[in-house]
């Protein structure tokens, strides 16, 4: 996992309603995976709270929480 630049794993439990909301967000935004959708929602939440600077121009392979040159080109299966 370290080769992808993501060496920490986070496991969460979701209710059926939360999972449906996540899947709806993922498909509406054409995300490549649930993990990408969770990272994007986390990035948006951190940005809204003032913890991350504004960023634009993301491609699906760039969905990550923090902007990092090493993670560009990373894709989640």
Image: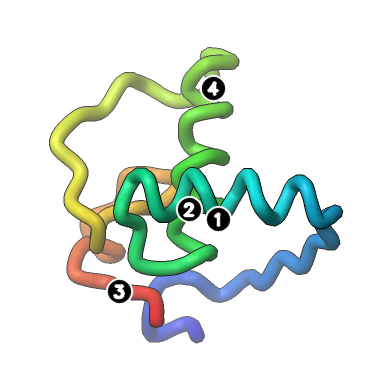
Mark-to-mark CA distance, 3 and 4: 24 Å
Q: Residues within 10 Å of mark 4 (few under 14, many from 20)?
A: few
Assign a secondary structure to mark 1: helix
Assign a secondary structure to mark 2: helix
Residue displayed at 84% across by 61% down: 13
Asked if disc 3 and disc 4 are in contact, CB closer than 8 Å, the reply is no
Q: Mark 3 points at which residue?
A: 75
Residue displayed at 21% across by 62% down: 72
Disc number lying in front (3 or 4):
3
Assign a secondary structure to mark 4: loop
- The relative height of residue 75 versus residue 66 in the rendered view (above or below) is below
Residue 34: percent from left, percent from top: 52, 64
Disc number lying in front (2 or 1):
1
**Tag 1 or tag 4, which sits nearer the N-term?**
1
Q: Residues within 10 Å of mark 3 (few under 14, many from 20)?
A: some
Q: How crowded is mark 1: few (under 14 residues within 10 Å), some or many (20 or more)?
A: some
Q: Name the residue under label 4.
A: 51
Mark-to-mark CA distance, 1 and 3: 18 Å
**Tag 2 or tag 3, which sits nearer the N-term?**
2
Mark-to-mark CA distance, 2 and 1: 8 Å
Comparing 1 with 16, the one in front is 16
- The relative height of residue 8 versus residue 22 in the rendered view (above or below) is below
Assign a secondary structure to mark 3: loop
Disc number lying in front (1 or 3):
1
Residue 57: percent from left, percent from top: 14, 36
Quadrant showing the C terminus: bottom left
Q: Name the residue under label 2.
A: 37
């Amino acid at each position: 996992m370290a080769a992808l630049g993501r060496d920490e794993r986070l496991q969460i439990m979701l209710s059926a309603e939360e999972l449906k909301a996540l899947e709806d967000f993922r498909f509406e935004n054409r995300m490549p995976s649930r993990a990408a959708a969770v990272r994007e929602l986390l990035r948006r939440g951190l940005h809204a709270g003032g913890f991350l600077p504004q960023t634009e121009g993301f491609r699906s392979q760039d969905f990550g929480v923090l902007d990092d040159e090493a993670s560009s080109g990373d894709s989640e299966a």
